[in-house]
């Protein structure tokens, strides 16, 4: 990847054209058009998300995803209907798809271009394909979705605006895309910078805040709205990970050990113990950060008119 090629999708958004600036102790380039922060190419380690170990959906993961769905169903009433067509764009290892099927959603399909993660998802016996075109082949016609889920994917996509336009064109009347990204203006990022749980500096291309959502409103022929964030699934875990990572000076220490399976069994047990010790403080901090409107994630919907 070079300074000459990293378009944001609406224009020839060249890295060399934007000024370098520091934010929360990290170096970025700000797009002169959409104002999103971008990582300099030299800092990029790996653009895609590394796969999780192939293992059954654990009780803890089901509990965390239940917290996510409880919040989302309150915000998006369409999710209360288990007969809707849901597309998980960038479904990763298929864990959320498997969870949705367990809940009784009968029309779901995942799209995952990364070959290893695609294999892991298929091993879970969930319907997943490598591209939107493959999804249309599988479905026997144009992709028509009630809900498209883009969950912590947009920050990895080279041309995010084109990505949203592409999936927006697949929405049924009244359908919506639910997008969640790390919030660069969160309290956690302000406090912990590089060691905050979700920036994952070196692996994300883009770093978003509410100003980017405002810009999207001028670019998309859809209604764009930020959801009031009460996603305790991500908030509690992120406070645990941010505090532990900052104390140990190891980026994403808890996440890498407990979700990605890095390190020895003794290290995993140590991270479990650390997490349990930090859990009460993380729960209190989660309530405070969400109440302030500066939670660790930013979730918004892109809705097609009608319905």
Image (cartoon, rainbow, N blue to C red):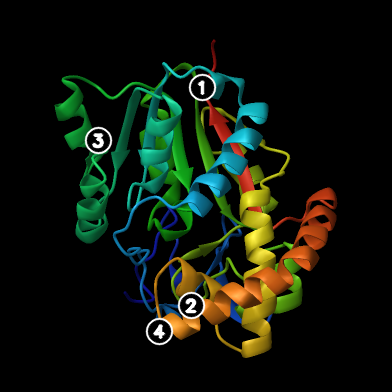
The residue singled out by tag 4 in the image is 264
What residue is at 56 percent from the left and 81 percent from the top? Answer: 270
> In the rendered image, which quarter contains the C terminus?
top right
Q: Nearer the viewer, residue 230 or 187?
A: 230
Q: Are marks 1 and 4 in contact (CB under 8 Å)?
A: no
Left or right of 43, for residue 66:
right
Q: Which secondary structure lies at badge 2? A: helix
Marks 2/4: CA distance? 6 Å
Q: Nearer the viewer, residue 128 or 63?
A: 63
Of the two numbered discs 1 and 4 on the same chain, state the one appearing first in sequence.
4
Left or right of 51, for residue 66:
right
Q: Are marks 3 and 2 in contact (CB under 8 Å)?
A: no
The residue singled out by tag 1 in the image is 304
Marks 1/2: CA distance? 44 Å
Of the two numbered discs 1 and 2 on the same chain, state the one appearing first in sequence.
2
How crowded pointer 1 is (Cα within 10 Å; few <14, some 14-19, many 20+) is rated as many
Residue 226 at least partly seen: yes
Of the two numbered discs 3 and 2 on the same chain, state the one appearing first in sequence.
3
The residue singled out by tag 3 in the image is 127
Q: Which mark is residue 85?
A: none
Marks 3/4: CA distance? 33 Å
């Amino acid at each position: 990847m070079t300074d000459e090629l990293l378009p944001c999708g609406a224009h020839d958004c060249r890295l060399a054209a934007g000024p370098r600036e520091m934010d929360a102790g990290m170096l970025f380039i700000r797009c002169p058009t959409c104002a999103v922060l971008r990582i300099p190419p030299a800092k990029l380690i790996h653009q895609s998300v590394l796969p999780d170990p192939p293992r059954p959906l654990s009780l803890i993961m089901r509990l965390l995803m239940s917290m996510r769905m409880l919040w989302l169903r309150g915000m998006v009433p369409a999710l209360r209907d288990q007969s809707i067509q849901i597309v998980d764009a960038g479904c990763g290892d298929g864990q959320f798809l498997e969870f949705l099927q367990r809940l009784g959603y009968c029309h779901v399909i995942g799209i995952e271009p990364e070959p290893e993660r695609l294999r892991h998802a298929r091993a879970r016996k969930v319907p997943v394909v490598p591209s939107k075109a493959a999804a249309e082949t599988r479905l026997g016609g144009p992709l028509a979705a009630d809900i498209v889920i883009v969950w912590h994917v947009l920050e990895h996509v080279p041309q995010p605006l084109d990505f949203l336009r592409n999936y927006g064109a697949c929405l049924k009347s009244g359908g919506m895309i639910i997008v969640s990204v790390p919030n660069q203006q969160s309290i956690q990022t302000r406090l912990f910078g590089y060691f905050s749980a979700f920036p994952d500096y070196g692996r994300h291309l883009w770093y978003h805040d509410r100003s980017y959502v405002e810009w999207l409103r001028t670019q998309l022929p859809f209604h764009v709205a930020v959801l009031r964030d009460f996603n305790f699934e991500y908030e509690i875990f992120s406070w645990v990970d941010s505090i532990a990572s900052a104390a140990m000076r190891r980026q994403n220490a808890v996440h890498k050990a407990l979700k990605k399976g890095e390190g020895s069994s003794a290290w995993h047990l140590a991270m479990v113990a650390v997490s349990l010790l930090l859990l009460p403080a993380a729960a209190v901090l989660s309530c405070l950060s969400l109440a302030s409107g500066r939670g660790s994630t930013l979730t918004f919907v892109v809705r097609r008119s009608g319905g």
